[in-house]
Image (cartoon, helix red, strand yellow):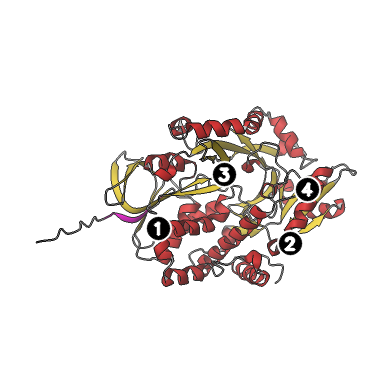
Amino acid sequence: MSRKRKTVVETDADVILIGAGIMSATLGLLLKELEPNLSIEIYERLDIAAAESSDAWNNAGTGHSAFCELNYTPQKEDGSVDIKKAVEIAESYEVSKQFWTYLVEKNILSDPCLFIRNIPHLSFVWGKDNVDFLKTRYTNLQKCNLFEDMQYSEDPNTIQEWVPLIMDGRKKKEKVAATKMDLGTDVNFGSLTREMFSYLSKQANVSLNFHHEIRELDKTEEGNWKIKVKNLETGKKQSRLAKFVFIGAGGGSLPLLEKSDIPEGKGFGGFPVSGQWLKCTNEEVIAKHHAKVYGKAAVGAPPMSVPHLDTRIINGKQALLFGPYAGFSTKFLKHGSFLDLPLSIKFDNIRPMVSAGLKNIDLTKYLIEQIRQSPEDRFEALKEYLPNADFKDWELEYAGQRVQVIKKKASGGGILEFGTEVVSAADGSIAALLGASPGASTAVSIMLDLLDRCFKTKLQTAEWQTKIRTMIPTYGEKLADNTSLCKKTRLRTSAVLKLNSLDS
């Protein structure tokens, strides 16, 4: 009696990455370093990598390490300050720096100054209640070695030395406070992403395809994924077969997750938030400010709208931005369609989206107020941080789109999340990244979590464990629990990435 042979289905690629942003670049490089023989196909609807969320003008670019972002240390009703999220983000950023250090050492990335530089991170507040909050925050953060180099001051003269433009013209009797971390960085995620893809695309069995849009995702009986792709230049459509698919398309991830029809993706919704910057055009003013200064967000404001006066290095040139000012658009991408939000509403996510909307009336009011702002209104917000600002020195620049995650609760209602969410199928054959802040800065940690979900068996092998620890020496350890390891790690990454180190 003859046995039936198991049908072997050939695939076009081991891995398909959708979207050419920092997340896909990070995952692609991690996988290629771990498994050099993997075949990878990358599809991007625009004509260049990192043109949406990862681009310098569309991304906060802070190198989010929770040094200065006050929304990562929320104040509770009893006045105490929760630092848990700040510690997690600071840990994750150190992981990212280790991976970038590895890429520089292997000459995958050339000059680190092209994408990362030192810029002090400051938090600045005024008024008694806000000063009390910042002091409590500082005291709590000092208990963690990741923040032990933070400085705190309520002395106007000291703060004047740190950020003169912010103190110039301010009332002498105004109660102010600031914290400062000299370990802070400015990261051009657009430049970083494009260099990562430049290397990746030259590797064997890797193809990078621009002007290509994913139209359908279907699971085959064999457990692979059939992807229908349209070439936006020629109009030609083709089908591709892959063992694993990652949806890292920023705001475009939710519609593609819905197309996949996996049970784990049911009930998710998206709430789009747009942004704008005020960009300084006066070179003399730009030259006088060398810091990223974050303040407290207005009540109901989304995290991407935390006000900050931000020194950036974009294409090798220093820039100064203030904002972002939040807005609302039904687009999920800066280069998207106004139908994105309506088309994302499905039977399984209507209730969560309505529920989340009703619970976030303050956010809705805030966005309406932001949309109605005149240029003079925006300028008044700037003057709270820069009292001597001149209206003629600033112009409006449009930032990127962010889609905040709406998650379905067990009760059937919904909750609006302001972080990132990895959604993966039970069999690990597909994963999608939803959400925004802190996003890019923690991309390596997010992708390591994805590997643990979708490549668990491989990840547990001695070969992969050894390779990951070569790329990220502190993999599996907590720097917050090990002061000497934290210092050793920062010394190494600072030396390779050409950053200042307080211990050097």
Name the one closer to the observer, 415 or 409: 409
Q: Distance between the Cα atoms at labels 2 and 3?
A: 34 Å
Nearer to us: label 4 or label 1:
4
Asked if the stretch drawn in magenta spans residue 478, the answer is: no
Q: Position of residue 372 (x, y in %)?
A: 65, 27
| Secondary-structure class at tag 3 | loop
Please give the label number shown on residue 58. 3
The kind of residue on which mark 1 rests is Ser
Considering only order in the chain, which callout, 4 or 3, is on the residue closer to the N terminus? 3
Q: Position of residue 325 (x, y in %)?
A: 65, 37
| Secondary-structure class at tag 4 | helix
Residue annotated with mark 2: 143
- Disc 1 residue crowd, few under 14, some 14–19, many 20+, Cα 10 Å: some
Considering only order in the chain, which callout, 4 or 2, is on the residue closer to the N terminus? 4
Rendered image quadrant of residue 457: bottom left
- Disc 3 residue crowd, few under 14, some 14–19, many 20+, Cα 10 Å: many
